[in-house]
Image (spheres, rainbow, N blue to C red):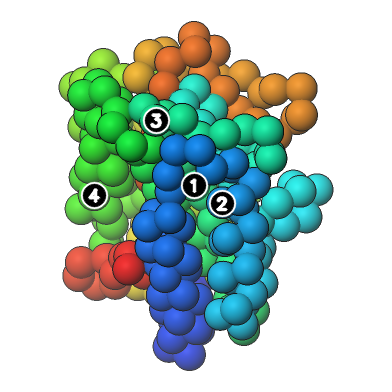
């Protein structure tokens, strides 16, 4: 599928889709506490997305059974919410959420602390978030796509963390996943030239240990092979001639 350049009207719709998703993430963040199940988080997110007049785009996506991906500790992404999975003090939990507003998709992820967490876990979360901001410093018209990938890699590599390679960021618009794919690790080529009007989901997934990941038997949950903690940070952004607009921030 080709890379799409959004019209002014489409950009307005993307902005609204993403603004609403920012509200969903804010609400979820405020409600996370030890003792709750990952299923409760999914229900809370699903109800809120629908209350906002939107559709959860993850639900039934390739058969994914929930509206919010909830991934705990060594789970990297696509954790399936469960009534049996109870958040414990000291866990880290990655919430990935998306919605459709008037046909336009938004997508964002954050990793949160459950109660008090270790200094090492805090640092992983902070570095993962900062790697997104390092990456998007390069995200402007006239630069190349892999400038973003290279900037994320250069920043994360200083900390000795593993950058997940099997999963990547992506274009987004009338579909959740549009071209291009956006790796979070260094590339030898330049990639396509960025143009104003592209909307991209940039989403570094960073492991405290090695980069390797494996898929669980549920065929969704991705975990670190070495059992180390993993964090995820994602926003949908708009490429402009100047600084990118981060559309999914609250
Ligand atoms: N945010 C995820 C992504 O960018 C979407 C989750 S896929 C789903 O690919 F199937 F779990 F919905
Ligand atoms: Co995404």
Disc 4 target residue: 133
Task: Give the farthest residue toward the front.
Answer: 35
Q: Is residue 200 left or right of residue 45?
A: left
Disc 2 target residue: 41
Mark closest to the chain's N terminus, 3 or 2: 2
195, 228: nearer the viewer: 228
Mark 3: which secondary structure?
loop
Looking at the image, which residue is at 58% across and 60% down? 44
Nearer the observer: mark 3 or 1; the answer is 3
If the image is split into quadrants, where does the C terminus sit? bottom left
Q: Are marks 3 and 2 in contact (CB under 8 Å)?
A: no
Disc 3 target residue: 89
Within 8 Å of ligand 2, the CB of disc 4?
no
Nearer the observer: mark 2 or 4; the answer is 2
Badge 2 crowding class, 10 Å Cα cut-off, few under 14, some 14 to 19, many 20 or more, is: many
Residue 67 image offset from top left, x and y in percent = 65, 56
Give residue 141's quadrant in the image.
Answer: bottom left
Looking at the image, which residue is at 54% across and 43% down? 36
Badge 3 crowding class, 10 Å Cα cut-off, few under 14, some 14 to 19, many 20 or more, is: some
Q: Are marks 4 and 1 in contact (CB under 8 Å)?
A: no
Mark 4: which secondary structure?
helix
> Residue 148 got which mark?
none
Q: Are marks 2 and 1 in contact (CB under 8 Å)?
A: yes
> Residue 95 got which mark?
1
Nearer the observer: mark 4 or 1; the answer is 1
Q: CA distance from mark 4 to mark 1?
A: 18 Å
Residue 174 image offset from top left, x and y in percent = 62, 72
Nearer the observer: mark 2 or 1; the answer is 2
Mark closest to the chain's N terminus, 2 or 1: 2
Looking at the image, which residue is at 63% across and 63% down? 46
Residue 220 image offset from top left, x and y in percent = 70, 34
């Amino acid at each position: 599928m080709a890379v799409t350049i959004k019209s002014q009207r489409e950009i307005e719709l993307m902005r609204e889709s993403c603004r609403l998703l920012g509200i969903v993430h804010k609400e979820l963040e405020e409600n996370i506490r030890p003792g709750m199940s990952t299923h409760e988080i999914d229900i809370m997110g699903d109800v809120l997305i629908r209350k906002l007049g939107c559709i959860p785009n993850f639900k039934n996506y390739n058969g994914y059974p929930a509206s919010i991906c909830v991934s705990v500790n060594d789970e990297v992404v696509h954790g399936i919410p469960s009534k049996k999975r109870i958040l414990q003090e000291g866990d880290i939990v990655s919430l990935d959420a998306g919605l459709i507003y008037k046909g336009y998709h938004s997508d964002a992820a954050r990793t949160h602390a459950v109660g008090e967490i270790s200094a090492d876990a805090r640092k992983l979360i902070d570095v993962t978030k900062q790697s997104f901001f390092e990456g998007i410093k390069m995200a402007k018209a006239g630069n190349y796509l892999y400038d973003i990938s290279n900037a994320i890699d250069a920043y994360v590599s200083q900390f000795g963390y593993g950058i997940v390679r099997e999963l990547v960021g992506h274009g987004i618009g009338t579909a959740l996943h549009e071209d291009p794919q956006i790796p979070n690790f260094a590339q030898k080529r330049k990639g396509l030239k960025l143009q104003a009007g592209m909307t991209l989901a940039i989403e570094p997934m960073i492991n405290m240990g090695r980069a390797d990941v494996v898929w669980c038997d549920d065929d969704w949950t991705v975990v670190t092979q070495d059992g180390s903690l993993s964090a995820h940070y994602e926003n949908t952004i708009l490429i402009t001639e100047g600084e990118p607009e981060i559309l999914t921030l609250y």
